[in-house]
Image: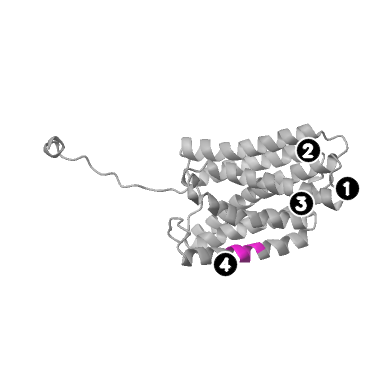
Amino acid sequence: MPTSVSSMAWGGSLAWFGAIALCSFLITWVVTDLLKVRRTAYVGLLALLTGGLTYGYLAWSQTDAVGFLRYHWAWGLLAAALTIGLNLELIRLLVRRGRLHAPPRRRLHGRSREVQVLWEDVIYGASEGMLLSVLPVLVLWQMSERLGWTAGWDGKLAAGALAFGGSLVVIGTHHLGYREFRSKRMVEPYIGCVWFTLAYMLTGSPLAAMVGHMGTHDAMLTHGFELPPHQETRAVTPPAPVHQRAA
């Protein structure tokens, strides 16, 4: 991973991590739960938020943005392909066992499908990959490096555990903002997202998480599942006649 600058304060890193965790929750809770914004507009807002946080942190930590994106890019693409295949097999396994209950949706074709790939696979997937699996790991790893914890293998293992735990926190807070995941279903995003975090940690390439997330989104849509927030429609039952209510 890119090294931190000597002037970077560990307290500032913790503040950045807190801001990432808080924003990851607010973007889902406020936009999808309170304001009921539909997924198309929500994806655009999520991309703007993730881009802003990424640019802000890279500028604050003086991390070279081009080097950050190109770091071990070939290994990142290979890891992304492996995580996509793994998640595809997990999706099939959970569907067969009846443990994946995302509501089915109509499959799109032609130009509608092309727009779907661009918006929900590429933009949505890349934004979530960066927000959930890259930024928290990068922030906490660079903080550990600045504190001198990564000098030996024992320190690197501890720093890696801290960074991985930070990603788990952000994955949880982000999906807690979705109404549909405030239940036992919270395990689903963990099952699908932890592999991207591990892929980024092993390769140091953000492409591992971003492209992996894109491919998993496409696999879910191909199998007929809807990405969050779920746009559920409920039939409105007409009120009973007066004489029935009186009875």
Mark 1 or 2: in front is: 1
Any part of residue 164 in sight: yes
Residue on which disc 1 sits: 151
Q: Bounds of the magenta span?
A: 83-87
Label of residue 59 in the image: 2
Mark 3–mark 2 Cα distance, whole angstroms, equals 14 Å
Q: Quadrant of the C terminus?
A: top left
Q: Earlier in the sequence, mark 3 or mark 1?
A: 3
Residue 110 position in % (x across, y down) = 49, 63
Crowd band around label 4 with a 10 angstrom C-alpha radius: few (<14), some (14–19), many (20+): few
Residue 186 position in % (x across, y down) = 53, 49
Q: Earlier in the sequence, mark 4 or mark 3?
A: 3
Secondary-structure class at tag 2:
helix
Residue on which disc 4 sits: 89
Secondary-structure class at tag 1:
loop
Pointers 4 and 1 in contact (CB under 8 A)?
A: no
Residue under the image location 80 percent in, 58 percent down: 72
Give 63 or 174, whichever is nearer the viewer. Answer: 174
Q: Earlier in the sequence, mark 4 or mark 2?
A: 2
| Amino acid type at mark 2 | Ala
Mark 3–mark 1 Cα distance, whole angstroms, equals 24 Å
What's the colour scheme?
one colour
Mark 3 or 1: in front is: 1
Mark 4–mark 3 Cα distance, whole angstroms, equals 28 Å
Mark 4 or 2: in front is: 4
Q: Earlier in the sequence, mark 3 or mark 2?
A: 2
Quadrant of the rendered structure where residue 83 is? bottom right
Label of residue 69 in the image: 3
| Amino acid type at mark 3 | Leu
Q: Earlier in the sequence, mark 4 or mark 1?
A: 4
Q: Residue furthest front?
A: 154
Crowd band around label 3 with a 10 angstrom C-alpha radius: few (<14), some (14–19), many (20+): some
